[in-house]
Amino acid sequence: MPEQPLVGVLIGSESDRERMQPCLDELAGRAIACELEVRSAHRSPDAVAEYCRGAAGRGLKVLICGAGMAAALPGMAAAYTELPVIGVPLRSEKSAMDGMDALLAMAQMPPGVPVAAVSIDGARNAAILAARILALL
């Protein structure tokens, strides 16, 4: 029987998978079960809300969200769950600021909607931070 995922990894587009692969590899290397979902804050907001509302009930302990440009996905996730949310700002060829826009969007969340943010394209660090959070539980 497969192990219950403890970490949910969300990306807004299939094109983000390659930059988030170091996160998945690090979690696998630490034998931390995870699940990857593609759900866009802009194209499928109801699906994001549904996923995040039910995350804790499914046994998840941490959410990691990779997002570029406006980077709405981590903030939206944090609005729908009490779980820790780690944002990974992703570079995008469509970005005018080479990922800095995504980092600022994550770092400037309003009070009551916290998102931890790692470095731009810092997917591996997000997995390490998730592992450290899990170690406290």
Image (cartoon, rainbow, N blue to C red):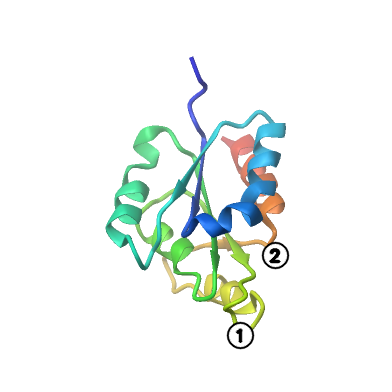
Mark 1 or 2, nearer chain start? 1
Q: Position of residue 10 (x, y in %)?
A: 48, 51
Q: Residue at x 65, y 38 (%)?
A: 27
For label 2, the SS is loop
For badge 2, the amino acid type reads: Ser
- The residue to which callout 1 is attached is 96
In-front residue for pair 12/106: 12
Bin the neighbour count of mark 1 within 10 Å (Cα to Cα): few under 14, some 14-19, many 20 and up.
few
Q: Is residue 86 left or right of residue 49?
A: right
Going 37% across and 34% down the picture, which residue do you hit? 58
Task: From the image, tell me which residue sits under label 2.
Answer: 119
Kindly indicate whether the residue at mark 2 contacts the one at mark 1 (C-beta within 8 angstroms): no
The amino acid type of the residue labelled 1 equals Ala
Q: Secondary structure at mark 1?
A: loop
- Most foreground residue, 134 or 27: 27
How far apart are the alpha carbons under marks 1 and 2? 17 Å
Quadrant in which the C terminus appears: top right
